[in-house]
Amino acid sequence: MIQIIDGNEVAGRIRSELETCLDTLERNGVVPGLATVLMSDDGASETYVSMKRRACDELGIESFHYDVDPGAPADVLLERLDELNSDSAINGVLVQLPLPDHVEEQRVLERLDPLKDVDGFHPENVGRLVTGTPRFKPCTPHGVQRLLAAADVDTEGKDVVVVGRSNIVGKPMANLLLQRSKLGNATVTVCHSRTNDLAEKTRGADVVVAAAGVPELIDGSMLTDGTTVIDVGVNRVEADTEKGYELVGDVEFESAKSRADAITPVPGGVGPLTITMLLYNTVKAASLQENVPVSLPE
Ligand code: NDP
């Protein structure tokens, strides 16, 4: 029988384990603080930031928010980051991406204190991940690993196809799956827009992680029976709804469902885990900075 992997349920379990970590921190006089920085007028980015802040409030992480005028020079954002880097009430800093075109993303990510880089995008944290000593695992791929574990999918020795090679999803996903560790040890193929015959690759996979940002790119005809399908994609497509759009993944859910043995829905699959692993990284950042050991959810 097909298993629909419920992201909200998995996220809820991890969040309740994080509460125990927060109790430990609190007994030692530490309340973790997360700063969110938004340099955009984009409605979706605003929504993502407010969801992250709400999740902090619900768990007992203090959240601080900073808007930077999207028309301002890059230096205004960089100076804000310098302030946050030296503010001891703030353990984690999240700069909501994408940034305006005139702001060089890499310069911004490099300006963050790597110990506060709860997205895990600073080159030092990327390097640690690639060399097998991760500090902050990027939230979305880390969440995907947790979903696979929750669905009892052991990735060891499995053929996993990751569709997408971005720095925030595809590449760190491939690196995590390659680690010599639990939730890793997979044989990983990374596909992208120049891949020849994507369907041939996905048909050969035990697990497909779709992160291309192309609505319903992968359908049932591109899968073999028994594949596990994790759909990271969140795409707005026009629809006859109140908002004028609906959210669809990178996987055509109905046809894929007829082939898969387990699959994540959109919404309600990967999304709740992305936010939860941000909370996880913020708790970890506070624990590292304040020297208070906590038992993070395994
Ligand atoms: P990017 O646009 O940065 O990267 C997309 C990747 O997919 C690129 O590597 C691109 O290849 C590849 N790609 C594009 N078209 C195809 C195709 N036809 N066949 C194969 N590969 C293709 O996106 P992100 O990685 O940031 O995000 C991917 C998706 O995940 C988006 O829908 C995004 O909204 C969603 N997302 C969801 C999150 C969640 O919490 N659920 C969190 C983060 C992202 P190339 O490199 O050649 O251009």
Image (spheres, rainbow, N blue to C red):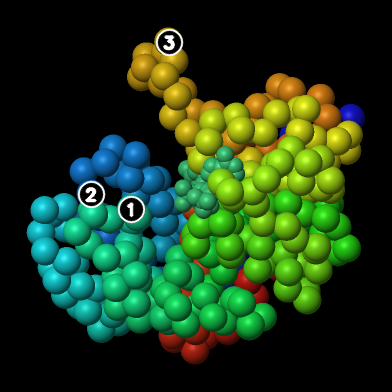
Residue 17, quarter of the rendered image:
bottom right
Point out which mark residue 195 bears: none
Image location of residue 15, percent across then percent down: 58, 56
| Mark 1 CB near ligand 1 (8 Å cut) | no
User: Dividing the image into 4 quarters, which one contains the C terminus?
Assistant: bottom right
Q: Amino acid at mark 2?
A: Ser
Q: Residue at x 22, y 62 (%)?
A: 103
Whether residue 52 is situated above or below residue 22 in the rendered picture: above
Q: Residue at x 53, y 64 (%)?
A: 138
Q: Amino acid at mark 1?
A: Pro
Q: Nearer the viewer, residue 33 or 162?
A: 162
Point out which mark residue 240 bears: 3
Q: Nearer the viewer, mark 3 or mark 1?
A: 1
Q: Residue at x 23, y 49 (%)?
A: 40
Point out which mark residue 40 bears: 2
Point out which mark residue 98 bears: 1
